[in-house]
């Protein structure tokens, strides 16, 4: 067919050949027949011939060289596709002899009238550079010409050629930097990725570190809280060109292309101020709805970020809950992220979710879940006991993999001295005969050897059993048996001397050389071996070992660029170019003040593109929609909110969320317009005053603006099948009509000092928990304040100042006190939603005497409301709250007035008084309404049991009750 004189047959044959290549079949044997048709007059045939030759020209170089003259003539064809195809084939022939010919072709093509041909010339430059590096200087001049091109079709390819040939020649970018930023939204998606990656390196070398003076950028300092102290600190001013880059790339976070979103996200993470980095979090979470491959890369990125900055993704916690349809690698990454995001406020939610994962059918996922529970226990001390009890309960599970992994994690926790190991080791030793996993058996033997003095009667018997099965054990178990033998011989030589000699005799003839060497080493510490080394045996084998450091496996990937192959595989791949550090003394911004190479006409399109970008792509930030991500924006929102409340309090109470979003978006647009005008005038952008924000908020909007200002926050999570619904303690079927909220049985009368008269310059403030419901919200704790004036002058303008609250907490101000006469006191009511946490609420009290920083730290007993329920329902609820949700302790002495003592400590309601020796109390937590149960059994000793859906409440409330009942 290729030798036919009919073009339609040739065209059909070429289509079949290209189809073979597309399917991965080898068509190289057809090269001689195809290359003859390069002179065909039919345009369609010639196009397909060039496609074929581009694929096989490098393999069949000799035959391709015979047609070079034809390719050179094709460079003058009127059809742009033929010219581009000929240049592609020429650059694909990897022969140094024709490098000058290819160089001339690229130079001519870079000045071609067709932007498609100029784009092809840019792609040919890296090919020629790899073939002949000596032509670098000439190629750089062509790259400079292509970078100044007016067409967006060429820009992306020109930047790609720059990155491959001369990435360190940043002076070429100075001239076109602002043009690249302006045209970025109009470039094709492949070009956007290339340009953003190049500009990331450029920003790291030309601009100052925007977080240089930010001392609160660590994950445990809540750098993204809406009430963080960062809002009170001056934000370092950015270079105008740095701000232009961030503003120009921000609309790309809404791109449909995942690679573009990832490129912009890594730009914000590596080069933007910490207060603006959360803008990328929302876009990354949106990508989790994409394909599995995209999810894997995005979750790797999120895991690396969350290991350093928890607050960035904490608002999207439920997005990372595992679904039954997820692949195993997706499950493991989500599990890693959940563990990284664990804080005191959300640990109960995460642990309840992890509890359901333990019963999954995927063994690798179950093992990782148990390790995650261990990491949570290590990082948050309040839940260590609960996690340890839960892991001990898993030792009775029928699944051997679950038991084995639980043993390994318990070993790590006991190394950290999380609890008394005696009972746990005894329980684990009983399971030694049924556990067959070598790693778990070795861990049990190691624990037994470390704590053999606490179980002196059990350890020798276990050594005797292990001696019987020594020959059949795994190598790692044999090593631990020998370690156990030498440790027991040191502490209890009378019972273990013969056993120790017998085990070393068996190990001496073992097949594994490592075991034989270990036996040869340890034999010097057994009987009949005297010497200096024998006297130091206790110091060698019984010395305390450091606890293992449990941390995220993504902590070592901080220096790798997000989204790169090196970051995904967690090690530097070949060809990886690390991000340069920010310069200590960045070059001045005047170097970018050059006359554009594309004339005045394109300057107008530059300005129009900027305006178009702000009109069509301005979108509400994640900080303004969630209220806890951007410290600087939260500060401005609180200021504008207070101004609005002074002008119209009724409007504040009835305002809806949509109107608030529109106000913040309008304010944001006004800031962008201000920045643009300052950039055009080459001045540092000036900060808008609060009055400008308020005035711009009230400007009338057109229909298009109202449409574009719609709330673009991610929708609520889709309800999908989850194991959590089957195993959570608060399962359905609650008999809510049998549960009644009752009045508190005890009320505090003794006030607590909040501000003393010396620190308050003559004004003192006390507070007490009233245990009555707050009128503003039932989830708020009602606190009574008392202001006393100890001076001889009036104190005026007493009000609440700035608030510095943890994530999830809220505070309702007390009424404004106009004047406080001398030697008088006035009461006030404060409402605080502690979010079921004992973290303190920090705020300021402002008066005519000054500003005073104070805080209120609640006890866990003040964070519940009393309820009453029948005995049967009480026992039913208690039976569901087992494992990590139950703590019990036996007090040695018996006390009277148990009901009064419990009521003084916790705001719980008594439930049943039919049994004189059993006292039951119940309540709900203020914020989450989690059920809390307390049972006191009185006999010769007191047995105290606490059950709660919130695992933190269990241990904290138990400790408070113990201290009160024991005093």
Image (cartoon, rainbow, N blue to C red):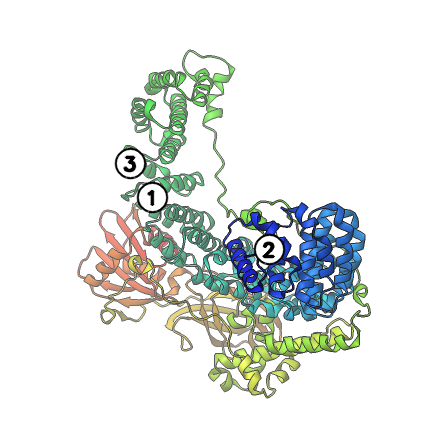
The residue drawn where x is 45% and y is 17% is 520
Disc with the residue nearer the chain's start (1 vs 3): 1
Dot 3: element:
loop
Disc with the residue nearer the chain's start (2 vs 1): 2
Q: Are marks 2 and 1 in contact (CB under 8 Å)?
A: no
Name the quadrant of the N terminus. Answer: bottom right
In this image, 345 relative to 427: left or right?
right
Dot 1: element:
helix
Q: Nearer the viewer, residue 937 or 684?
A: 684
What residue is pinned by disc 2? 52
User: What distance separates the C-alpha of mark 2 from that of mark 3?
Assistant: 68 Å
x and y percent of residue 517 in the render?
46, 19
User: What distance separates the C-alpha of mark 2 from that of mark 1?
Assistant: 57 Å
Quadrant hosting residue 401: top left
> Which mark is on residue 431?
3
| Label 3: few (<14), some (14–19) or many (≥20) C-alpha neighbours in 10 Å | some
Q: Nearer the viewer, residue 834 or 364?
A: 364
Q: Are marks 1 and 3 in contact (CB under 8 Å)?
A: no
> Can the viewer see residue 203?
no
In this image, 767 relative to 160: left or right?
left
x and y percent of residue 197 in the render?
65, 58
Please tell me whether mark 2 or mark 3 is closer to you in this view: 2
Q: Looking at the picture, does residue 278 appear above or below residue 24?
A: below
> Which mark is on residue 402?
1
Dot 2: element:
helix
User: What distance separates the C-alpha of mark 1 from that of mark 3?
Assistant: 13 Å
């Amino acid at each position: 067919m290729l030798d036919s004189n009919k073009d339609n047959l040739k065209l059909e044959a070429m289509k079949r050949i290209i189809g073979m290549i597309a399917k991965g079949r080898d068509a190289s044997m057809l090269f001689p027949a195809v290359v003859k048709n390069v002179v065909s007059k039919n345009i369609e045939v010639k196009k397909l011939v060039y496609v074929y030759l581009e694929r096989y020209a490098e393999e069949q170089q000799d035959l391709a060289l015979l047609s070079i003259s034809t390719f050179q003539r094709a460079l003058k064809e009127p059809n742009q596709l033929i010219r581009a195809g000929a240049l592609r084939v020429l650059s694909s022939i990897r022969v140094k002899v024709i490098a000058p010919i290819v160089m001339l072709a690229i130079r001519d093509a870079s000045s071609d009238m067709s932007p498609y041909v100029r784009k092809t010339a840019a792609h040919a430059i890296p090919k020629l550079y790899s073939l002949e590096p000596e032509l670098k200087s000439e190629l750089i001049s062509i790259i400079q010409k292509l970078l100044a091109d007016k067409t967006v079709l060429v820009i992306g390819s020109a930047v790609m050629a720059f990155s491959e040939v001369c990435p360190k020649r940043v002076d070429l970018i100075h001239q076109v930097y602002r043009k690249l930023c302006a045209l970025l939204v109009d470039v094709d998606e492949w070009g956007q990725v290339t340009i953003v990656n190049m500009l990331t390196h450029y920003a790291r070398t030309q601009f100052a570190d925007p977080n240089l003076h930010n001392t609160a950028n660590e994950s445990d300092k809540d750098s993204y809280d809406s009430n963080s102290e960062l809002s009170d600190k001056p934000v370092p001013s950015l270079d105008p060109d740095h701000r232009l880059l961030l503003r120009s790339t921000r609309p790309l976070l809404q791109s449909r292309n995942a690679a573009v979103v990832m490129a912009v996200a890594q730009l914000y993470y590596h080069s933007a101020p910490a207060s603006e980095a959360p803008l990328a979090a929302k876009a990354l979470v949106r990508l989790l709805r994409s394909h599995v491959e995209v999810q894997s890369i995005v979750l790797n990125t999120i895991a690396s970020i969350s290991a350093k900055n928890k607050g960035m993704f904490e608002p999207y916690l439920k997005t990372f809950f595992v679904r039954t349809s997820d692949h195993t690698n997706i499950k493991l990454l989500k599990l890693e992220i959940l563990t990284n995001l664990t804080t005191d406020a959300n640990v109960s939610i995460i642990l309840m979710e992890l509890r359901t994962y333990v019963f999954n059918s995927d063994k690798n996922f179950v093992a990782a879940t148990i390790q995650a529970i261990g990491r949570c226990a290590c990082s948050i001390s309040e839940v260590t006991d609960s996690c340890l009890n839960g892991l001990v309960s898993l030792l009775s599970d029928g699944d051997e993999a679950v038991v084995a992994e639980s043993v390994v994690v318990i070993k790590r926790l006991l190394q950290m001295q999380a609890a008394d190991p005696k009972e746990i080791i005894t329980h684990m030793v009983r399971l030694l005969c049924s556990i067959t996993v070598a790693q778990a058996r070795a861990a049990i033997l190691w624990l037994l050897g470390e704590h053999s003095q606490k179980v002196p009667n059990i350890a020798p018997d276990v050594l005797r059993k292990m001696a019987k099965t020594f020959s059949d054990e795994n190598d790692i178990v044999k090593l631990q048996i020998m370690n156990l033998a030498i440790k027991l011989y040191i502490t209890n030589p009378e019972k273990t001397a013969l056993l120790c000699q017998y085990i070393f005799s068996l190990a001496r003839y073992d097949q594994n050389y490592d075991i034989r060497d270990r036996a040869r080493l340890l034999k010097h510490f057994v009987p009949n071996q005297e010497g200096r080394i024998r006297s130091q045996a206790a110091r060698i084998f019984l010395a305390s070992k450091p606890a293992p450091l449990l941390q995220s496996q993504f902590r070592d990937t901080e220096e790798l660029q997000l989204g790169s192959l090196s970051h995904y595989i967690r090690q530097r791949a070949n060809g990886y170019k690390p991000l340069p550090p920010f310069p200590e003394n960045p070059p001045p911004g005047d170097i970018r003040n050059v006359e554009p190479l594309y004339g005045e006409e394109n300057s107008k399109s530059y300005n129009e593109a900027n305006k178009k970008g702000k009109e069509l792509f301005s979108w509400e930030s994640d900080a303004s929609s969630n209220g806890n991500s951007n410290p600087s924006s939260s500060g401005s929102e609180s200021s504008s909110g207070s101004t609005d409340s002074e002008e119209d309090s009724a409007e504040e109470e009835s305002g809806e969320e949509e109107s608030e979003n529109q106000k913040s978006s309008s304010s944001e647009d006004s800031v962008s317009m201000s920045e643009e005008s300052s950039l055009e005038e080459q001045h540092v952008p000036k900060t808008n005053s609060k009055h400008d924000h308020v005035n711009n908020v009230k400007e009338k909007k057109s229909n298009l603006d109202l449409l574009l200002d719609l709330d673009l926050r991610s929708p609520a999570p889709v309800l999908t099948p989850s194991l959590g619904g089957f195993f959570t303690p608060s399962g359905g079927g609650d008999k809510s009509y049998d549960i009644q909220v009752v009045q508190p049985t005890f009320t505090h009368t003794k006030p607590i000092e909040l501000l003393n008269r010396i620190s308050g310059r003559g004004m003192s403030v006390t507070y007490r928990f009233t245990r009555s419901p707050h009128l503003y919200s039932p989830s708020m704790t009602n606190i009574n304040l008392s202001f006393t004036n100890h001076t001889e002058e009036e104190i005026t303008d007493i009000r609440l100042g700035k608030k510095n609250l943890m994530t999830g907490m809220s505070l309702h101000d007390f009424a404004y006190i106009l004047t406080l006469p001398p030697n008088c006191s006035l009461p006030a009511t404060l409402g605080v939603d502690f979010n079921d946490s004992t973290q303190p609420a920090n705020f300021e009290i402002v008066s005519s005497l000054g500003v005073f920083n104070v805080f209120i730290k609640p006890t866990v007993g003040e964070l519940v409301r009393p309820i009453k329920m029948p005995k049967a329902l009480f026992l039913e609820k208690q039976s569901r709250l087992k494992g990590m949700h139950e703590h019990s302790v036996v007090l040695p002495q018996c006390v009277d007035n148990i009901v009064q003592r419990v009521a003084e400590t916790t705001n719980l309601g008594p439930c049943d008084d039919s049994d004189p020796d059993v006292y039951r109390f119940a309540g709900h937590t203020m914020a989450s309404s989690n059920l809390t149960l307390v049972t006191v059994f009185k006999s010769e000793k007191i047995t105290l049991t606490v059950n709660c859906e919130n695992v933190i409440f269990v241990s904290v409330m138990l400790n408070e009750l113990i201290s009160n009942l024991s005093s």
